[in-house]
Image (cartoon, rainbow, N blue to C red):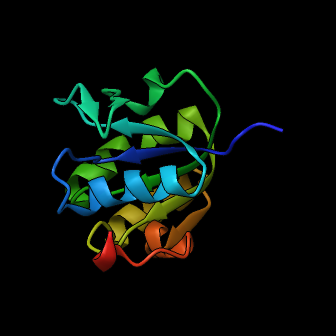
C-alpha cells in the first residue's frame, strides 16, 4: 500500500508559519509531503517544488496556504495536476477562489488541514 501524498502550496521555511506547520503535521501523519514554494530549495529537509505541476507523483491532497489573490492563480495548475482533496485553509479563502476551484471541478474542503490530521497548530 502506498503512502498518501500531499502538496503544501505556500510552504514556508519559517517554523512559526502555518505553511511550515502543515508540512510537519503531514510528515508526522505519514504522508509523503511535497512543499511548493517558488523561492525555497529545502523545507524541513524536503525538496521544494516551484509549482504543483513539477511534482512527480499523483496527489491525494493539496493544502493551500496562500493569500486568496495568489491562490486563485494556482488553481488551474492544481486542477491540471489533479487531487482528491483541496484544502483551502483559513485566511486563504475568498468567494472568488472557492467559486473558481469548484468551476474547475476540484473537491474543496474549507478548513485547516492540520486540524484534519488531529494536530493542534498551536502546539506544533
Q: Position of residue 16 (x, y in %)?
A: 17, 63
Q: Residue at x 67, y 45 (%)?
A: 4
Q: Quadrant of the N terminus?
A: top right
Q: Quadrant of the C terminus?
A: bottom left
Q: Is residue 72 above or below residue 54?
A: below
Q: Residue at x 47, y 74 (%)?
A: 119
Q: Position of residue 54 (x, y in %)?
A: 44, 21
Q: Nearer the viewer, residue 92 or 16?
A: 16
Q: Is residue 89 above or below residue 122?
A: above
Q: Nearer the viewer, residue 28 or 21?
A: 28
Q: Residue at x 42, y 65 (%)?
A: 88
Residue 70 in the figure: left or right of residue 60 = left
**Total marks in image:** 0
Q: Nearer the viewer, residue 26 or 49?
A: 26
Q: Nearer the viewer, residue 93 or 35?
A: 35
Q: Residue furthest right?
A: 1
Q: Residue at x 34, y 37 (%)?
A: 36
Q: Position of residue 43 (x, y in %)?
A: 28, 37
Residue 41 in the figure: left or right of residue 120 = left
Amino acid at each position: 500500500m502506498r503512502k498518501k501524498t500531499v502538496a503544501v502550496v505556500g510552504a514556508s521555511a519559517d517554523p512559526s508559519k502555518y505553511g511550515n506547520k502543515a508540512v510537519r503535521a503531514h510528515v508526522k501523519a505519514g504522508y509523503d509531503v511535497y512543499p511548493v514554494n517558488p523561492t525555497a530549495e529545502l523545507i524541513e529537509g524536503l525538496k521544494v517544488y516551484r509549482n504543483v505541476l513539477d511534482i512527480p507523483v499523483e496527489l491525494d491532497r493539496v493544502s493551500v496556504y496562500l493569500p486568496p489573490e495568489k491562490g486563485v492563480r494556482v488553481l488551474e495548475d492544481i486542477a491540471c495536476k489533479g487531487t482528491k482533496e483541496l484544502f483551502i485553509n483559513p485566511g486563504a479563502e475568498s468567494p472568488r477562489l472557492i467559486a473558481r476551484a469548484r468551476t474547475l471541478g476540484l473537491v474543496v474542503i474549507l478548513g485547516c488541514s492540520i486540524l484534519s490530521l488531529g494536530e493542534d497548530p498551536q502546539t506544533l
